[in-house]
Image: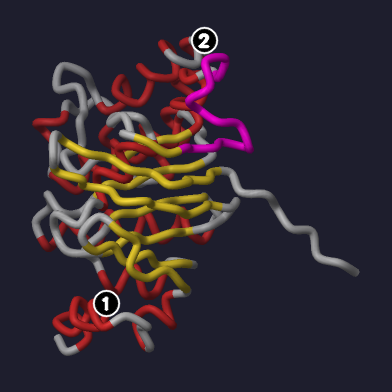
Amino acid sequence: MVPVTQSPILKINHLRKSFGMNEVLKDIDFAVSPGDITCVIGASGSGKSTMLRCVNLLATPTSGEIYFHDQNIFEPTFNLNAYRSRVGMVFQSFNLFHNMSALENCMVATRKVLKVSKEEARERAMKYLSKVGMAPYINARPKQLSGGQQQRVAIARALAMEPEILLFDEPTSALDPQMVGEVLAVMRDLAREGLTMIIVTHEMAFARDVSSRVIFMDKGTIAEDGPPAQVFENPKEERTREFLMRFLNA
């Protein structure tokens, strides 16, 4: 029996991004297939977060193409609002509405963007708040929650949109060390369930153990791209090896 190959959800071709004279992304190419867990690693300033922000159009690429199910998202007829609703984002700084409860934070986007009923929005919010262990805190405002709890609410909010891909921009970098584990545990569960994710992270053990693929970025380029065992244990590039030395010898 010939295995069925799934076409990529997302394809990035020759992506470049400059801020003035500073070229932050240089000819980025990669594709994401259903169920891929892609961890993007690299030093600060290597372009990781900028690449993620270009994927979900928080930043506009200087040039290049992004295809979503083989449709160029920059074509005039492409529905960008639908695209944004299918590509979720979890930020390092949570970005919750401070005047809303955890439940309200998880309902607002489904109500305003997807136009679902209040009842369905609440049902979705409760489902995903329960999934991330935040059901007991549905009436709490962000200031009443720890950083780890806020990030779990932010993940539930993104999941409530039921996206095809979820992007994580260093989701644990703003957390105290004791709170990192609770957020990574949620992400491990999502990986086991087969959610397609692109994760910019400094958590090397997580990238090694959970990802199906690791991309190492350096100076605005993809310097290495492969399975975690290959990238971590037998990197092809000297610059990858140098970057990983501090983690592998820790």
The Cα–Cα distance between marks 1 and 2, rounded to whole angstroms, is 49 Å
Write the residue at 37% across / 51% down.
27
Residue placed under numbered mark 1 in the picture:
240
* Residue 37 coordinates in the image, percent (x, y): 47, 59
Image quadrant assignment for residue 109? top left
Q: Is residue 75 magenta?
A: yes
The residue range painted magenta reads 65-78
Residue placed under numbered mark 2 in the picture:
117
Write the residue at 24% across / 66% down.
203
Q: Classify the position of the C terminus by image quarter.
A: bottom left
Image quadrant assignment for residue 204? bottom left
* Residue 173 coordinates in the image, percent (x, y): 15, 54
Image-based side of 178 in relation to 215, left or right: left
* Residue 26 coordinates in the image, percent (x, y): 30, 51
Viewer-nearest of labels 1 and 2?
Answer: 1
Classed neighbour count for the residue bearing mark 2: other residues with Cα under 10 Å, few (<14), some (14–19), many (≥20): few
Residue type, label 1: Thr
Image-based side of 217 in relation to 166, left or right: left
Write the residue at 17% across / 26% down.
141
State the SS at label 2: loop
- Does 203 sit above or below residue 237? above
